[in-house]
Image (cartoon, rainbow, N blue to C red):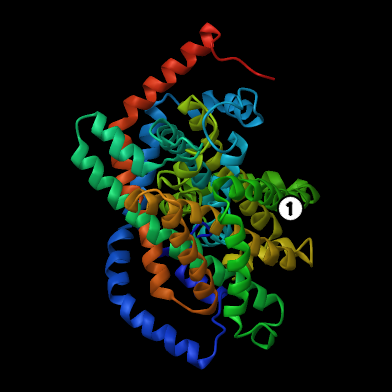
Amino acid sequence: MFWKKTAAASTVAFASAVLPHVATAQEVTLDEKINQVVAPVSNVIAGFMFYSVPVAGTDFPLIVGWLVVAATIFTLYFGFVQFRKFSHAIALVKGDYSHPEDAGEVSHFQALATALSGTVGLGNIAGVAVAVSIGGPGATFWMILAGLLGMASKFTECTLGVKYRNEYADGRVSGGPMYYLSKGLAAKGKPGIGKVLAVVFSVCCIGGAVGGGNMFQSNQAFQQIVNVTGGPQSVLAGSGWLFGLVMAIIVGVVIIGGIKSIAKVTEKIVPLMAVIYVTAGMIIIISNITMVGDAFAQIFVGAFTGAGVAGGMIGALIQGFKRAAFSNEAGIGSAAIAHAAVRTKEPVTEGYVALLEPFIDTVVICTMTALVITISGELNSGLTGVELTSAAFASAFTWFPLVLALAVVLFAFSTMLSWSYYGLKAWTYLVGEGTGKEIVFKLFFCLCVILGASMNLGPVIDFSDSMIFAMAIPNIIGLYFLMPVVRAEISQYWDKIDRGEIRKVK
């Protein structure tokens, strides 16, 4: 079974059903030509990356096991850091320990918002619906568990992202897995392995950024606009290139300013999206408060007995773990690139901030979706994906599908901003720093926005999805080697707090 994954993840079947292609005959012909060239390579890579084994009658992608096992190991190794230091993470995001003179380009909150903009998306809206419709309400329990474990993965990779970042004289920084893989493993006497892992990660990151983090996002946004403006009869039907051009100009204006400009936009969009979505969900839940107890009962009982259409308890577990892994990207390494730009002298502080991401993305927003679907009574309606979530919210707000369409566009836009930065940093790692080299990538990225909106590039997107999850292989190998470095950072950080060298500034 192959699962599409972008920051707005969903299944291939869901994508083809919900995002119908609207194009002219000429465009379809061009699409087919490109697909015929890419498909053979894409199928091989996707088949390898998403190789699944049958477990209790359902397929389990090994890459999901790779991510969940790593998250469990990090949770145990760092003594359940995600629970013990949760309150300290909140204090850091509030700026209680922030010093303006620290090296870096963005605040803790801006780094968190930028990274969240790359993960919070259609996966939270549609992907959860797919998981619950297949695995039953019990999938939610396992989704929450995997999300909680993933917090430790984010903590580990983002601490290292700051620890091994490059700081330049003009105040810019570059960091992420490619730097801690090469520099960190070199410090441990394994420069060759580190360099190879860093290059593999960078190549995969560029592929994922251009496809899943860009082309699929613009295509998805365009199709949603067409759907709510009349479908095939919409005045925009067949004008994907025009929509893509407008989107590319907007994206270009933002990303040309670098991470500071991106952060200023995402720190506004992400909270706005989350507030709108969570508020609507809370209204539905509160208005049906008498049903909440039963909904949680279905979630808990279903987790161990199985109430879905596939695999019983194991099916619920697999669907929950899939959704968490595909949604919050813990262990992929992408978030470490954004967090590396933070203003701080203590790497571990950003690790604490980063552990909030899976909590917000999976434990809060994904659970909210699952609860609304369960309470609404739409779970057995035969719908799935975004249609199921839309119907569940529409049971209380008839106008919510329009809001959902707006949310999808905003999700797509913010995801493109984040992944433009991830791809840029992977690009400059490979070819070197320099304004000219950065402009080349940014122009290419904006061109891909136009192509993505105007074409149906199935195999191209399949390939880029595979690249995103391929990032997890070199990343997690490096994290296993560098876990002791993170532990040392934790120890020295709290020693400084105990000695009074680090204290609250407000």
Q: Position of residue 87 (x, y in %)?
A: 60, 25
Seen in the picture, residue 478 relative to 399 is either above or below; the reply is: above
**Image check: 288 left or right of 164?**
right
Compare residues 279 and 424 and report the one nearer the observer. Answer: 424
Residue 127 vs 366, above or below: the answer is below
Picture coordinates of residue 502, whole percent (x, y): 55, 15
Image quarter in which the C terminus is found? top right
Nearest the camera: 136 or 265?
Answer: 265
| For residue 402, side relative to residue 206 (left or right) | right
Residue for point 19% across, 30% down: 189
Tell which of 118 and 145 is nearer to you: 118
Residue receiving disc 1: 276
- Residue 210 is drawn in which quadrant? bottom left
Question: How many numbered discs sit on the rendered protein?
Answer: 1
- Identity of the residue drawn at 65% across and 45% down: 267
Q: Residue at x 32, y 53 (%)?
A: 62
Name the quarter where the N terminus is drawn.
bottom left
Taking the image as drawn, is residue 294 in sight? Answer: yes
Q: Quadrant of residue 465?
A: bottom left
Q: Residue furthest bottom?
A: 25
Residue 217 place in picture, x, y as percent? 54, 65
Amino acid carrying label 1: it is Ile
Residue drawn at point x = 69 percent, y = 84 percent? 234
Label 1: which secondary element:
helix
CA neighbours of label 1 inside 10 A, class few (<14), some (14 to 19), many (20+): few
Residue 359 in sight here: no
